[in-house]
Image (cartoon, rainbow, N blue to C red):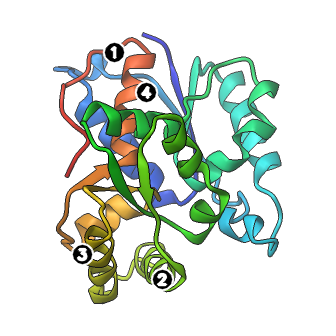
């Protein structure tokens, strides 16, 4: 098997969640049958949404530093444990000599495999405004239902004031209303398009037809390093 490298820290809980999903999705009976994983949980990578909105430093240089570190330590394949960070992928992917799996493309391809023609996106303001999921959906002829300005505020608040703040008592009533409204606008399922949203779904017991972006990435990482995968759909 090849060695997997995770560019993490965006945020740290999302990094742990991705690693957990990789372990649980690997068909292994002993420690030795699991994947060799290198993780750089670099919490000093600048905030991605702030950079996209012009309020902060670009994370690209720090992400490249992390990628090079993992490569130098023996990683054969890299993944990024953050949806929004993929906006900056083109700025540095050619500066490392190992492949970096594109989570966004893989998630949308998974939607196609599941037969969806119209999906909603639950994400940060940064991810919505970059259009990275919109471009991928256009490529694969899927209609994307995106949250409007008020809806995105509710989602963003849950991510930052809820998950990132380790607030287990966060009130998700506004987010549940967003999901209901977007479903009425045609969303057959919802891409959990921020790596904190799958954690939020679990933490706050939010119900819906969700496509877990980090679980899709976990499955693709397992396949990329040549490990056996426990077959399951990345839908919760």
Question: Between disc 2 and disc 4, whose residue precedes?
Answer: 2
Name the residue carrying label 4.
Answer: 221
Name the residue carrying label 3.
Answer: 204
**Is the Cβ of the residue at disc 1 closer than 8 Å to that at disc 2?**
no
Question: Between disc 3 and disc 2, whose residue precedes?
Answer: 2
Name the residue carrying label 2.
Answer: 157
Q: Secondary structure at mark 4?
A: helix
Q: Secondary structure at mark 1?
A: loop
**Is the Cβ of the residue at disc 3 closer than 8 Å to that at disc 1?**
no
Name the residue carrying label 1.
Answer: 227
Whole-Å distance between the Cαs marked 2 and 4? 30 Å
Up/down of 187 relative to 148, above or below: above
Graded by Cα atoms within 10 Å as few (under 14), some (14 to 19) or many (20 or more), the crowding at tag 1 reads some
105 lies left or right of 67 = left
Question: Between disc 3 and disc 4, whose residue precedes?
Answer: 3
Q: Secondary structure at mark 3?
A: loop
Graded by Cα atoms within 10 Å as few (under 14), some (14 to 19) or many (20 or more), the crowding at tag 2 reads some
Whole-Å distance between the Cαs marked 3 and 4? 27 Å
**Is the Cβ of the residue at disc 1 closer than 8 Å to that at disc 4?**
no
């Amino acid at each position: 098997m090849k060695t997997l490298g995770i560019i993490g820290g965006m945020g740290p809980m999302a990094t742990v969640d991705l690693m957990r999903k990789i372990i649980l999705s690997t068909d292994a009976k002993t420690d030795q049958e699991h994947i060799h994983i290198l993780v750089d949980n670099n919490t000093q990578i600048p905030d991605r949404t702030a950079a996209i909105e012009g309020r902060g430093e670009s994370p690209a240089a720090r992400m490249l530093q992390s990628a090079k570190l993992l490569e130098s330590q023996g990683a054969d394949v890299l993944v990024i444990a953050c949806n929004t960070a993929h906006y900056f992928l083109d700025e540095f992917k050619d500066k490392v000599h190992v492949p970096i799996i594109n989570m966004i493309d893989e998630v949308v391809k998974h939607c196609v495999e599941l037969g969806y023609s119209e999906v909603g996106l639950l994400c940060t303001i940064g991810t919505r405004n970059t259009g990275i999921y919109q471009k991928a959906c256009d490529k694969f002829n899927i209609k994307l239902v995106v949250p409007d300005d008020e809806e995105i505020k509710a989602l963003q608040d849950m991510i930052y004031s809820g998950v990132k703040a380790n607030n287990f008592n966060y009130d998700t009533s506004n987010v549940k209303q967003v999901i209901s409204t977007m479903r009425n606008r045609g969303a057959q399922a919802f891409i959990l398009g921020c790596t904190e949203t799958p954690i939020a779904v679990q933490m706050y017991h939010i119900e819906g037809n969700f496509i877990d972006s980090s679980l899709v990435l976990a499955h693709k990482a397992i396949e990329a390093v040549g490990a056996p995968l426990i077959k399951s759909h990345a839908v919760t």
